[in-house]
Image (cartoon, rainbow, N blue to C red):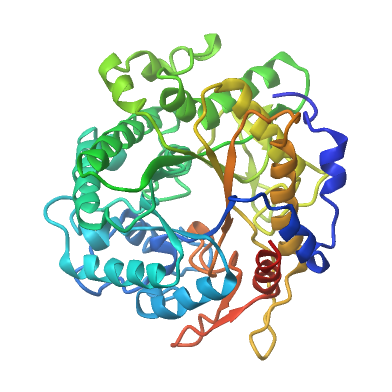
Amino acid sequence: MNATPRTPASTRAVAARDWEHRAGELGDRLPTGFEVAVATSAFQIEGAARDGGRGDSVWDSFSQRSGRIRDGSNASVSADHVKNYAADAVLLRDLGVDAYRFSLGWTRLQPEGRGPLNRNGLAFYDRLLDALLADGIRSTATLSHWDLPAALRGGWLNRDTAGRFADYAHAVGEALGDRIDAWVTLDEPATVTTRGYALGTHAPGRTLLFDALPTAHHQLLAHGLAVQGLRAADVRGRIGLVNSHTPVQSATDRDQDRSYTALYDLLQNRLFADPVLLGHYPDPLEPFGVELRTLLEAAPADLRTIQQPLDFYGMSYTGPARIAAGATVLKAPDGQPIPVTSWPFHLEPFREHPTTSTGDVNASEYVAVALAELAERYPDLPPVYLSLAGGAFSDQADARHQVHDPARIDYLAEHLVVALVATASGAPAAAVDLAGFAFWSLLDGFEWDAGYTQPTGLVHVDFADDRRTRTPKSSYRWLQHALANR
């Protein structure tokens, strides 16, 4: 929460531009044994929404509501990965990555969020895992990447959902646990709570603000119960979760801005990491005791369940946040304010840095800040895997579907190099055992409320073509070259 990033000048100097022509140099920088992965999520790429008995998730319902998705699209077909998984496995093999981080579609495996696993869904993941194994690609499977079954009434507001998730985890562990190398219980529960239940910009579209906080506890409880369920199933793979971490700074030195900066840090970062890594919630901030009362009501038994020993910890990083007091105010073209649900604070822009096409701050030096804060706050961290949530740029495909995307190459390379430098011996985050890095993402897909307007893939997907033709972008060829030079 400093006014300026705690980033050494040497880190910024390493993150020079024009990485498109420096793939070999990047390959040389990768430590021995460092895992390089690419990631996707089931809802964003799988398609086949009505095939094989798949049930509806909250995102299926949300995307059918008018005005919720920027381009009015849905993910019923998307990249059609279910039908094209074999071609996608070849893309992974040819890319040369060590691992593929994907998510299991909860509604494809358990359409109603309870009961026996769907044989058709299992058969699909059997085929995918066999294809990965045949090419020597390790698998990291996320049990749920935001695709909560719509049939679970109340969603994460209902404590019973945590129990349903535990049952699902145990069943999947018994079915697939002999072939999966690593398990992620949940991906970015902070995003689900904030965007899905507090602000309503993601599924299920609730606007509860501070009354959304029970969803944080129920997700964390689900994580702990799922870890127990996987271990009871005797899975052979390592187990962890992925939390988002955002470096936060105050827009000014005014007391009110600094107070809301501390509140944002608590809601975005510490609320989700402290119980998992320290066994307790952060102390509620004095001015916000009523709003944060949920933290004081957590049962000690729940906290013991949440703090399961982990084999690894996943840190998802998008960019920094600069906080100022005052609710967000949006204006219509005529200048009139638009009513929105908002916290009593807002994000100020980082005018000194460029942004991605989604508006995320493109300032790789803040990766070092996030890692240093992680090391400082949590002294007994397991190995850490960093995933980069972002990389949306204004891709323009030519007539042959070729995409030249040097901005994405620079973005990915700079964030990886800064992370490696920040965790090297003698660096501020040297205590972090950085074991791997996952690039987002393998394929263009359905980017949540942005629909298909913000492609993030290393591989272009032609959504106007019924075959969903795949064409590797320049960034794919660049990463392929870098990995071949390790």
Q: Is residue 463 above or below residue 349?
A: below
Instruction: Work out whether residue 255 or residue 469 is closer to the camera in this orientation and state it.
Output: 469
Residue name at image x 40 percent, y 33 percent = 310
Residue 100 appears left or right of 248: left
Residue name at image x 28 percent, y 22 percent = 302
Q: Is residue 52 above or below residue 440?
A: below
State the residue lying farthest toward the front: 32
From this viewpoint, is residue 105 visible? yes
Residue 148 appears left or right of 420: left
State the residue lying farthest toward the left: 115
From this viewpoint, is residue 206 visible? no
Instruction: Work out whether residue 75 or residue 417 is closer to the camera in this orientation and state it.
Output: 417
Q: Is residue 415 above or below residue 111?
A: above
Residue 244 appears left or right of 297: right
Residue 90 in the image: x percent, y percent? 48, 78
Residue name at image x 63 percent, y 45 percent = 330
State the residue lying farthest toward the top: 286
Disc count in the image? 0
Instruction: Work out whether residue 471 or residue 362 is closer to the camera in this orientation and state it.
Output: 471
Position of the C terminus, as image quadrant, is bottom right
Residue 471 in the image: x percent, y percent? 59, 82
Residue 246 in the image: x percent, y percent? 61, 36
Residue 277 in the image: x percent, y percent? 45, 25
Q: Is residue 342 above or below residue 117?
A: above
Quarter-wise, where is residue 157 in the image? Answer: top left
Position of the N terminus, as image quadrant, is top right
Residue 103 appears left or right of 408: left
